[in-house]
Image (cartoon, rainbow, N blue to C red):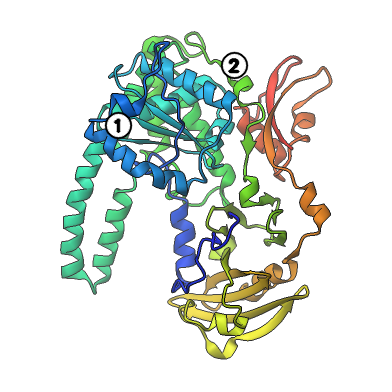
Amino acid sequence: MKTGTGTGLRHSGKNPGYSLHAVVGLIGLLALSGCQSVIEQTYEPSVAPSATPQIVEEVQKNDPRAQVGAREHPRIVASYGGEYKDEKTERLVARITGALTAVSENPNQSYRITILNSPAINAFALPGGYLYVTRGLLALADDASEVAAVLSHEMAHVTANHGIQRQQREEAEVIASRVVSEVLSSDIAGKQALARGKLRLAAFSRNQELQADVIGVRMLGEAGYDPYAAARFLDSMAAYARFSSVDPDSDQSLDFLSSHPSAPQRVDLARRHARAFGADGAVGDRGRDYYLAGIDGLLYGDSPQEGYVRGQTFLHGTLGIRFDIPAGFQIDNKAEAVLATGPEEVAIRFDGVADAQRRSLTDYIGSGWVTGLKPDTIRPITVNGLEAATARASAERWDFDVTVIRIDGQIYRFLTAVPQGASSLEPTAQTLRTSFRKMTSQEAAALKPLRVRVVTVGARDSLASLASRMMGTERKLDLFRLINGMQVTSSVRPGDRVKIISE
């Protein structure tokens, strides 16, 4: 959650007409990512395969496709926390992209690459050569060939004009949506049709994804990278999705793989096309040594501006606040809010708004931003010596607890949602309320961001000893294996270089 007045904390202090039953839907929708033709951040030097890089703005200034990318680009930057600036890592990504450009479907296409300052595992493309990759994806990848697999896939979307085709599909969908809303506006079936339409537009089509996979694997092999990296990294992303899920067996339909064809199908396709270059392990370069050198020190997880999640605790040094989320919840620290999802459909949202009017907190709760508010439940309370207020609300099939707390010029807000009648509402809200407090100056000063650190395996090291050095997770061995592309049967040898997460 970002700092600042009216940040995600991002409200201006005006009443946003906040509908509490949207908490659950919002948390689900925010998990939707994958190969979306959305807006993201920018990485300035646009690198061509030659020694004289071309500048996107000059090469494509009259290209209407590039104008689409340029128009959308600022919104992507804003929504993903800005660009991640690190010269070493930027050079690494530029090197990979330059090698791929030389063998692309259109070698004259120049690219503008942005490393996004986000821990999410994602990559995107916009028409006109705008490519985006998150630092979270760079942290998960085990070598240069895996990042090349992702970028070649995205470059294939650009050279195949999938973004333009999607735009045409959107225009057709808008017309269809108008018909649905006019004819079936009061009908549940109509609303469901509109929802399905929006999900369809969140991603490229199945055929476009498969086409980009085929082109991407060919580019990998022709650029001299390990062509099996695409299949390998698809497996890694699927494993990370399972690791990140509260319930590993739950429906993953809205995770970052949701906008792609099923992972097993894509893995099989990638392997089949990779065989055209030779046997697995016998062809292509993985580029692991220079990749590890390029990401050593990479910021991992939350950035200082958004606060940190440490186990089940959220801490924000700049704001000077901390609180605990109940055990069993998955915490997602977004730019606009801290979201958490737990067992039995329980959901939590935490954010802040500027408190310019300094009205009483009971008046603030009743000022119209809470849908389904029960006015007779509003009451003033104290939270660890801080002025606060709480209330209950109900909407559709959900019950809510609303708790607001004032510190100086900010009002912090907890929204807890449970299925109607569930007994978990009060215990969950109580955990949040009783644990929320101001941090001491010593606590704030001690907070440091987590980073990817590359270490050399020593003679006495084992998987267990290396994993014990991991920070930021209770499942240290599982995450260690994930970020190093290891299986349950994998082992380490003296002299190996591996990634750990530490301060």
Q: Earlier in the sequence, mark 2 or mark 1?
A: 1
Q: Is 178 in front, or is 107?
A: 107
Q: Is residue 432 above or below residue 110?
A: below
**Quarter of the view holding residue 503:** top right
Residue 263: x %, y % from top left: 42, 36
Question: Which residue corresponds to the image point at 25% horizontal and 66% vertical from the top-left?
Answer: 189
* Of the pair 219 and 484, the residue shown nearer to us: 219
- Amino acid carrying mark 2 in the image: Tyr
For badge 1, the amino acid type reads Gly
State the CA–CA distance, disc 2 to disc 1.
29 Å
Identify the residue shown where x is 84% and y is 21%: 460
Residue 220 visible somewhere in the drawing: no
- Which is closer to the viewer, label 2 or label 1? 1
Residue at horizontal 27%, vertical 60%? 194
Which residue in the protein does label 2 denote? 290
Relative to 485, is 456 on the left or the right? right
Task: Identify residue for label 1.
Answer: 128
Percent of width and height locating residue 308 = 67, 50
